[in-house]
């Protein structure tokens, strides 16, 4: 009948109930995150990009933007390696061909990653979410416009030169296109380090360089791989990625591998070149 003992028992019961609620919320968060990673990885392995766009539009609903970037940064390295290994670009000849086509893009990456890391560590959570939303909205607007232009241009091309396909040999690019590559590399590095979404600037350049489907996917993976290795190294040095973060990332590795395998082995070979060009637009 002691009131103190009764209050203590009730307090313990409330604490146990709160711990059980938090545990269930944590399990739900892990399941939700695994589903997001699986879907993003399969789309990325199919088209050559898209994982970060999906991950960073959904995971910040569960956590802060810096935490989502830190959790997914190691996954992006592994996913790029997986897609590269399935594309046949890891051979000496394939790597040298990739290097000739992306070398100017890589020149701007270090500067963009450095500035992006500073933004990642200084932006407040509301500001980070707001800027991430602007990036996503701007990318959607650009894809909508270019999709319309691509459809119109293809109709004109079909009427005149139906078998004409652009080439993607950067040895004959103009200085203007090389400067565009450096600037797009800077933008991609900044967005990758800040929000984990470095694909939009690369897609803009790939359209200017007229990369065909045979070059697009491996080119993107090589850039992603180098960019993400640099970003992960900088985050580890700065303390954003810790042992605790890596332990949490381990839960997301199996769905990343499963999605990458499904996209590379089953989905990507089923997409024809014209269909791929439409999806990329």
Image: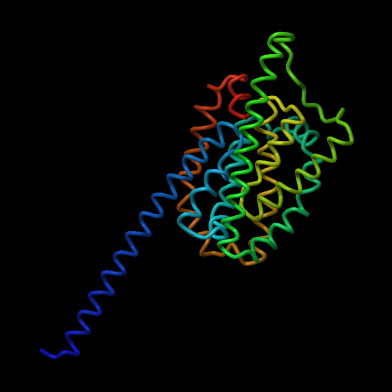
State the image coordinates of residue 204 (x, y, percent, origin top left).
71, 36
Frontmost residue, 203 versus 170: 203
Q: Quadrant location of residue 82?
A: top right
Q: Residue at x 41, y 53 (%)?
A: 30
x and y percent of residue 186 in the render? Answer: 76, 48
The reply, left or right, for residue 182 in relation to residue 24 is right
In the image, residue 162 above or below residue 270: above
Q: Quadrant of the C terminus?
A: top right
Choose top left, top right, bottom left or bottom right for residue 218. top right
- Depth check, front residue: 77 or 128: 128
Nearer-the-camera pick, 174 or 223 = 174
Residue drawn 51% across the image and 41% down it: 40
Q: Above or below — where is 146 with respect to 234?
A: above
Taking the image as shown, residue 46 lies to the left or right of residue 30, namely: right
Q: How is the image coloured?
A: rainbow
> Would you say 158 lies left or right of 168 here?
left
Q: Vertical placement of 218 versus 249: above or below?
A: above
Residue 98 higher or lower than 167, as above or below: below
Residue at 67% from the left image edge and 65% from the top image edge: 237
Image quadrant containing the N terminus? bottom left
Q: Position of residue 144 (x, y in %)?
A: 61, 32
């Amino acid at each position: 009948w002691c009131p103190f003992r009764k209050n203590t028992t009730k307090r313990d019961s409330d604490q146990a109930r709160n711990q059980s609620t938090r545990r269930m919320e944590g399990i739900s968060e892990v399941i939700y995150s695994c589903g997001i990673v699986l879907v993003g990885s399969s789309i990325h392995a199919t088209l050559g990009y898209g994982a970060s766009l999906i991950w960073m539009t959904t995971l910040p609903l569960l956590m802060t933007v810096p935490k989502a970037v830190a959790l997914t940064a190691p996954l992006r390295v592994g996913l790029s390696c997986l897609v590269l290994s399935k594309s046949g670009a890891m051979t000496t000849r394939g790597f040298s061909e990739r290097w000739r086509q992306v070398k100017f893009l890589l020149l701007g990456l270090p500067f963009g990653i450095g500035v992006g890391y500073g933004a990642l560590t200084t932006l407040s959570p509301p500001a980070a979410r707001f800027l991430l939303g602007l990036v996503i909205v701007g990318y959607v607007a650009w894809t909508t416009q270019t999709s319309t232009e691509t459809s119109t241009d293809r109709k004109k091309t079909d009427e005149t030169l139906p078998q004409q396909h652009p080439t993607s040999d950067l040895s004959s690019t103009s200085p203007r296109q090389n400067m565009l590559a450096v600037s797009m590399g800077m933008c991609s590095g900044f967005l990758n380090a800040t929000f984990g979404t470095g694909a939009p600037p690369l897609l803009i350049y790939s359209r200017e360089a007229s990369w065909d489907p045979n070059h697009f996917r491996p080119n993107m993976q090589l850039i992603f791989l180098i960019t993400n290795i640099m970003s992960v190294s900088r985050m580890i040095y700065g303390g954003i990625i810790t042992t605790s973060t890596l332990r949490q990332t381990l839960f997301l590795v199996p769905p990343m591998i499963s999605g990458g395998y499904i996209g590379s082995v089953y989905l990507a070979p089923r997409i024809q070149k014209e269909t791929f060009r439409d999806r990329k637009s």
